Image (cartoon, rainbow, N blue to C red):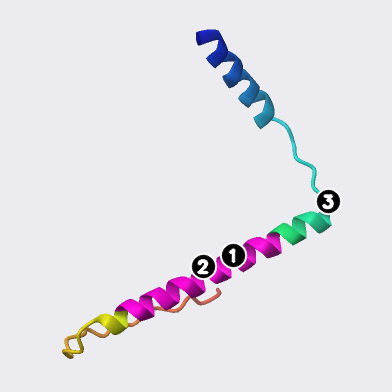
């Protein structure tokens, strides 16, 4: 078992040092897919927050809070 575990660790170390060559078109395609997933995730999170906020009782007890905007320097 010990030698098998050592062999697996060695194999993982070998593979981690390899570079992955990807054509630019495939890279761009995967980046766009990732951006789409991130966008959808943000939209679903926003909808979930909206849904949960609508379920809250409307008792008028709220604190206003300003959200600072990031300014480019």
**In the rendered view of the protein, which quadrant contains the C terminus?**
bottom right
Q: Residue at x 65, y 21 (%)?
A: 11
Q: Which residue carries the number 3 mark?
A: 23
Residue 5, horizontal then vertical, whole percent: 53, 16
Quarter of the image where one finds residue 32: bottom right
- Provide the secondary structure element on which disc 1 rests: helix
State whether residue 26 appears in this view. yes
Tell me if label 2 and label 1 are in contact, CB under 8 Å.
yes
- Provide the secondary structure element on which disc 3 rests: loop
Mark 2–mark 1 distance (CA, rounded to whole Å)? 6 Å
State whether residue 65 appears in this view. no
The span picked out in magenta is: 31-52
Of marks 3 and 1, which one's residue comes earlier in the chain? Answer: 3
Q: Is 12 contained in the magenta span? A: no
**Mark 1 crowd level (few <14, some 14–19, many ≥20, 10 Å Cα):** few
Tell me if label 3 and label 2 are in contact, CB under 8 Å.
no
Asked whether 37 or 22 is in front, the reply is 37
Q: Which residue carries the number 2 mark?
A: 41
**Mark 2 crowd level (few <14, some 14–19, many ≥20, 10 Å Cα):** few
């Amino acid at each position: 078992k010990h030698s098998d575990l050592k062999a697996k660790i060695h194999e993982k170390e070998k593979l981690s040092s390899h570079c992955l060559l990807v054509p630019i078109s495939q890279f761009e395609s995967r980046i766009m897919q990732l951006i789409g997933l991130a966008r959808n995730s943000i939209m679903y999170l926003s909808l979930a927050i909206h849904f949960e906020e609508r379920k809250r009782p409307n008792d008028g007890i709220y604190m206003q809070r300003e959200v600072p905007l990031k300014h480019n320097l």
